[in-house]
Image (cartoon, rainbow, N blue to C red):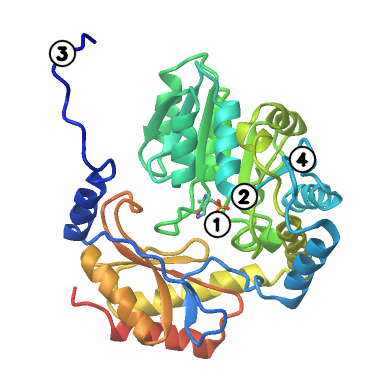
Amino acid sequence: MPEDAPRAAVPEDPFGWTADEARRRADAGLVRTLRPRPADTDLLDLAGNDYLGLTRHPEVTAAAAGAARRWGAGATGSRLVTGTTALHAELERELAGFCGFEAALVFSSGYAANLAVLTALGARGSLLVSDADNHASVVDGCRLSRAETAVVPHADPQAVRKTLAAHPGRRALVVSDSVFSVDGDAAPLGALAAACREHGAALVVDDAHGLGVLGDGGRGAPHAAGLAGAPDVVATVTLSKSLGSQGGAVLGPARVVEHLVNAARTFIFDTGLAPAAAGAALAALRLLRREPDRPGRARAVAADLHTRLTAAGLSAARPDAAVVSVRAPSPEAAVRWAADCRAEGLAVGCFRPPSVPDGVSRLRLTARADLTEEQTDRAVAAVLRTAPPC
Ligand code: PMP
């Protein structure tokens, strides 16, 4: 640039624009704030994802503490360097066996597992077909991959079929949540797999909300649909919901897992899952094997919540797993409703744009296998007492 050329004005404050964003959020009722949770509280928790009530189970916390003492507080390195312990290998073996897949690979989060699958399997030139209501981590995985992404209408195998047919001969992956986190409805996995097979596409199922809740003894949605272990199916799971720990995993054919070990950047360049988290997830998995009734109890609590809330006139989708989603008239009403529930001693989730695909804000109640009847009564009463006028 010549020295005498006019210079653009230098902004005084490089983050000044965030104040405008904050004002815009406030005007739309979409401000989010962090609230540290006390360790001990009388608040009844229907906001977390501890579906089986295992996160504070003495065997699970003892396993976490024992693993930290034995292996250290951190994994010390990436999985390919020093971050793989015997615990990681054991967890992978047992998780794959339980869910009915040939192999498993543990990640530091379910988010990282989704990014891994979509980026390492969705190469440039291939096609990703993604449900419009998929979780943000799936959306981000599609964006990060070099593949072309086609977003198809929610739970619509016919739309998937049409999209695949429009790209004959293309290497393709169809990706869907098994249970959608906003409305708690289940994907038509059998029909999606059939559409995939007609066109030689692979199916990727994000089973974050299905593991431990759906399928025989909580073996997950792919197992329930007869797809576990199929050569053309990959599942991702989180260890942070029904297993009460932290971390994620990919389940699938051994050759796919071997490819991820060599090609998935969120595996290769990320520090391995903390041993405490691996130990806790393994203990929770063993508990789930020993107590196969927990998943059914979580589903029954969800069905009961739904029946009683809709009977009282609230609008809620029928839960296919443990997520009960109740519609609110506006984002502001949802925030107020959740706050009023909290004042009544009940913690519930509050979903607003951009976390909802259709712009409709919701209260989100998560059923837990360990909720007593008295607690369920209390939760229903609190939600109804504080409900805004429709
Ligand atoms: N997929 C879905 C459907 C989820 O709900 C979540 C967690 N909210 C994730 C993936 C990410 O899992 P994690 O929290 O272990 O990163």
Q: Of circles 1 and 3, which is in front?
A: 3
The disc labelled 4 sits on which kind of residue?
Ala
Task: Residue 5: give its label.
Answer: 3
Observer-nearest residue: 385 or 146? 146
Residue 214 on image: x %, y %: 61, 59
The disc labelled 1 sits on which kind of residue?
His
Instruction: Check mark 1 vs ligand 1: CB closer than 8 Å? yes or no.
Output: yes
Residue 106 on image: x %, y %: 70, 46
Q: Is 332 placed left or right of 106 in the picture?
A: left
The earlier-in-sequence mark between 4 and 1 is: 4
The disc labelled 2 sits on which kind of residue?
Val
Give the residue number, with chain letter if any, for mark 2. Answer: 237
Judge whether residue 214 can be spotted in this image: yes
Query: Could you give the CA–CA distance between mark 1 and mark 3, rounded to whole angstroms?
Result: 58 Å
Judge whether residue 195 can be spotted in this image: no
The earlier-in-sequence mark between 3 and 2 is: 3
Query: Could you give the CA–CA distance between mark 3 and mark 4, rounded to whole angstroms?
Result: 62 Å
Task: Residue 209: give its label.
Answer: 1
The earlier-in-sequence mark between 1 and 3 is: 3
Query: Could you give the CA–CA distance between mark 3 and mark 2, rounded to whole angstroms?
Result: 56 Å
Labels 3 & 4 near each other (Cβ < 8 A)? no
Residue 213 vs 147, above or below: the answer is: below
Residue 3 on image: x %, y %: 20, 12
Give the residue displayed 62% in from the left and 63% down from the top. Answer: 242
Q: Is 316 placed left or right of 81 in the picture?
A: left
- SS under mark 3: loop
